[in-house]
């Protein structure tokens, strides 16, 4: 038996990569609208109501509108947008954190944001285990490849490169209030909004998300914070059974993001600690279009369809 999957937004950056991952899989029958029909609401509504699972790869408003087109109680949904990540009735599609069984049983699954995937993978298990406090104002510094901004940002970077006026580094989110903050706060159970400093570099894909932990300063405020080794051990045990998430124990002097990063659905976690134990830098390296978007959507789709969790995923690491 095959699962019929409609990709709404299949001509976009995330949608195209999901279609590539599903490729010629015999267990999936793909529904993709032709170019002249892909924005035709009647055609979209028909496809959404006919499929087993709809994967929405759309801007937030279009994703909300797509949900309003569902007229049955059978179509299941994976939404790659920000629209439903903290909405009631939706399961947050991060199986390693919320439980594969919850995603498998879910009707409405919200795919996590790319930056929150790195942040939550690091912080949520440590807060839940009491190794980091919930009431600390966490900061995260992150860089993303420019495909993270979809077709518009790809065009901007590639046309500037072509004109010989390439953007090497783009700091943004300068007014704060990034759309990823609510899901990071809610899913990690934090008392405060994290302070988020995102940036884009001149590479197509890939991202590094860093969370600095001023251990000694926090301890001087009588907060309970573990040391680097305890954090690394806790993360290693938490992700011990995962095919996609790994925790590095390698000694390193630099963490690189290569411009030629191949597509990967893995997520690598790092815990760097000062020798005197006073400071820690938690870091996550992933492909924004892999575990940060399309790979996560395919993982969730596999679970929801009762198929092997990593079917069709790219398991080679970045190294
Ligand atoms: N890129 C990334 O790394 C990540 C993206 N996401 C999220 O995934 C979603 C898709 O992003 P991304 O693929 O990057 O964006 P893109 O801009 O590359 O693609 C969006 C696609 O949606 C189409 N579209 C827009 N409005 C409608 C509509 N009303 N009906 C049908 N199709 C429509 C666009 O059409 P057209 O081609 O004509 O513009 C485009 O093809 C967004 O919500 C994004 O935030 C999530 C995690 C990471
Ligand atoms: C580089 C870049 O612009 N990135 C996007 C986030 C991509 C993403 O995860 O988007 P969703 O939350 O909508 O899924 C941004 O910061 O808005």
Image (spheres, rainbow, N blue to C red):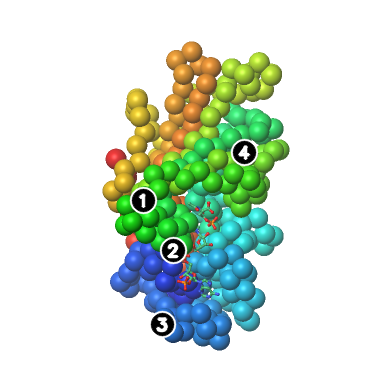
> In this picture, is 16 found above or below 201?
below
33 lies above or below 55: below
Residue at 65% of width from left, 76% of height from top?
68
Q: Quadrant of the C terminus?
A: top left
Q: Earlier in the sequence, mark 4 or mark 3?
A: 3
Residue at mark 4: C-beta within 8 A of ligand 2: no
Q: Is residue 124 left or right of residue 267?
A: right
Between the C-alphas of marks 4 and 3, the distance is 42 Å
Which mark, by number, is residue 195?
A: 4
Going from the N terminus, do you reach mark 2 or mark 1 first? 2
Q: Name the mark on residue 165.
A: 1
Q: Residue 151 has which mark?
A: 2
Which circle's residue, 2 or 3, is located before the other in the chain?
Answer: 3
Tell me whether circle 3 and circle 1 mark residues in contact (CB < 8 Å): no
Q: CA distance from mark 2 to mark 1?
A: 19 Å
Q: Residue at x 49, y 28 (%)?
A: 281
Q: Nearer the viewer, mark 1 or mark 4?
A: 1
The residue mark sitting in front, 3 or 1, is 1
Q: Is residue 253 above or below residue 198?
A: above
Residue labelled with disc 3: 34
Q: Quadrant of residue 193?
A: top right
Say whether mark 1 is within 8 Å of ligand 2. Answer: no
Cβ–Cβ below 8 Å for labels 2 and 1?
A: no
**Cβ at disc 2 under 8 Å from ligand 1:** yes
Report whether residue 152 is seen.
Answer: yes
Q: CA distance from mark 1 to mark 4?
A: 31 Å
Tell me the SS state at disc 1: loop
Q: Residue at x 47, y 56 (%)?
A: 149
Observer-side mark, 2 or 1, equals: 1
Q: Are marks 2 and 3 in contact (CB under 8 Å)?
A: no
The residue carrying pointer 4 sits among few (fewer than 14), some (14 to 19) or many (20 or more) residues within 10 Å by Cα, namely some
């Amino acid at each position: 038996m095959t699962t019929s999957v409609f990709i709404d937004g299949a001509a976009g950056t995330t949608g195209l990569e999901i279609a590539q991952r599903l490729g010629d899989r015999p267990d999936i029958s793909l529904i993709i609208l032709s170019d002249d029909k892909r924005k035709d609401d009647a055609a979209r509504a028909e496809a959404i109501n006919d499929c087993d699972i709809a994967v929405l790869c759309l801007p937030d408003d279009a994703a909300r509108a797509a949900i309003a087109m569902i007229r049955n109680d059978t179509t299941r949904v994976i939404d790659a947008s920000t629209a439903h990540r903290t909405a009631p009735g939706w399961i947050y599609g991060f199986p390693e954190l919320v439980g594969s069984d919850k995603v498998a049983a879910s009707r409405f699954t919200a795919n996590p944001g790319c930056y929150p995937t790195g942040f939550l993978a690091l912080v949520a298990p440590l807060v839940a285990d009491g190794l980091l406090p919930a009431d600390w104002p966490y900061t995260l510094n992150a860089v993303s490849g420019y495909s993270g901004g979809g077709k518009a940002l790809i065009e901007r970077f590639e046309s500037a490169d072509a004109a010989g006026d390439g953007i090497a580094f783009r700091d943004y989110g300068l007014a704060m209030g990034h759309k990823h903050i609510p899901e990071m706060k809610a899913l990690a159970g934090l008392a405060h909004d994290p302070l988020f400093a995102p940036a884009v570099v001149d590479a197509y894909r890939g991202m590094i998300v860093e969370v600095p932990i001023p251990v000694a300063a926090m301890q001087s405020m009588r907060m309970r914070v573990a040391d680097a080794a305890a954090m690394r051990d806790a993360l290693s045990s938490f992700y011990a059974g995962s095919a996609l998430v790994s925790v590095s124990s390698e000694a390193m002097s630099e963490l690189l993001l290569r411009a030629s990063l191949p597509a990967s659905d893995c997520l690598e976690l790092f815990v760097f600690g000062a020798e005197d134990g006073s400071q820690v830098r938690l870091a996550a390296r992933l492909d924004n279009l892999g575990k940060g978007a399309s790979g996560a959507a395919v993982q969730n789709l596999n679970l929801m369809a009762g198929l092997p969790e990593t079917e069709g995923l790219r398991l080679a690491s970045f190294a």
